[in-house]
């Protein structure tokens, strides 16, 4: 549907926005922080059966653990009392298979200098979840690193499955 001249989607969103006072404290009731992707198809409250006030939800492209994600988690634990972290990435992610070098080259060609960040493309979804879990466990600024788990949200077939710390070892027969 075409928008009237001079109107943006943000104008539309702001025009229909409401926010009622919650009466909830800033400390998540479940003591959990969830790192997940910014993908608009994911509703973390519905996926994990949460209500407002239950958990911190930290979203970014790919659900990756970046320095900004770590900053949010440190504040979540140190200032707001969370003790557990769930890293939840998903199938059919736009960052899955992203060529970081090609993206950086495209940006450099367009703006004249390379980005100071990387896109975070990954080839293997489970390995990406495990790498994020390892990164968090190796972050001494997080006081609570013993309850870090990973999961994959399946946007193709539905469901959520936990990712084990390491894949099962296959033994030769």
Image (cartoon, rainbow, N blue to C red):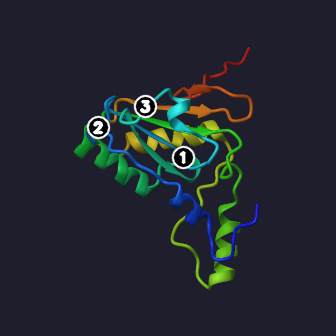
Q: Which residue is mark 3?
A: 51
The residue at 49%/54% (across/down) is 17
Alpha carbon of mark 2 to alpha carbon of mark 1: how far? Answer: 26 Å
Q: Quadrant of the C terminus?
A: top right
Q: Which residue is mark 2?
A: 24
Taking the image as shown, residue 102 lies to the left or right of residue 33, namely right
Q: Is residue 9 above or below residue 128?
A: below
Q: In what element is the residue under mark 2?
A: loop
In the current view of this chain or complex, which residue is farthest to the top? 173
Residue 141 visible in the displayed image: no
Are circles 1 and 3 on residues that touch, CB within 8 Å?
no
Are circles 2 and 1 on residues that touch, CB within 8 Å?
no
Q: Quadrant of the N terminus?
A: bottom right
The residue at 31%/44% (across/down) is 76
Q: Is residue 171 above or below residue 16?
A: above
Q: Position of residue 126 (x, y in %)?
A: 62, 36
Q: In what element is the residue under mark 1?
A: helix
Q: In what element is the residue under mark 3?
A: loop
Q: Classify mark 2: residues with Cα within 10 Å, few (<14), some (14-19) or many (20+).
A: few
> Which of pointers 2 and 1 lies earlier in the amino acid sequence?
2
Q: Position of residue 27 (x, y in %)?
A: 27, 38
> Which of pointers 3 and 2 lies earlier in the amino acid sequence?
2
């Amino acid at each position: 549907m075409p928008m009237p001249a001079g109107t943006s989607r943000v104008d539309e969103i702001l025009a229909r926005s409401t926010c009622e006072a919650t009466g909830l404290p800033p400390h998540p009731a479940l003591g959990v922080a969830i790192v997940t992707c910014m993908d608009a198809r994911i509703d973390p409250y519905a996926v994990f059966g949460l209500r407002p006030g239950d958990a911190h939800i930290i979203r970014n492209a790919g659900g990756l653990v970046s320095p900004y994600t770590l900053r949010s988690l440190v504040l979540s634990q140190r200032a707001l009392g969370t003790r557990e972290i769930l890293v939840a990435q998903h199938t059919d992610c736009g960052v899955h298979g992203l060529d970081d070098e090609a993206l950086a080259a495209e940006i450099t060609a367009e703006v004249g200098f390379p980005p100071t960040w990387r896109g975070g493309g990954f080839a293997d979804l489970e390995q990406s979840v495990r790498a994020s879990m390892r990164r968090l466990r190796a972050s001494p600024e997080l006081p609570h690193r013993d309850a870090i788990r990973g999961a994959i949200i399946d946007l193709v077939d539905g469901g959520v499955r936990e990712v084990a710390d390491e894949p099962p070892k296959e033994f030769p027969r």
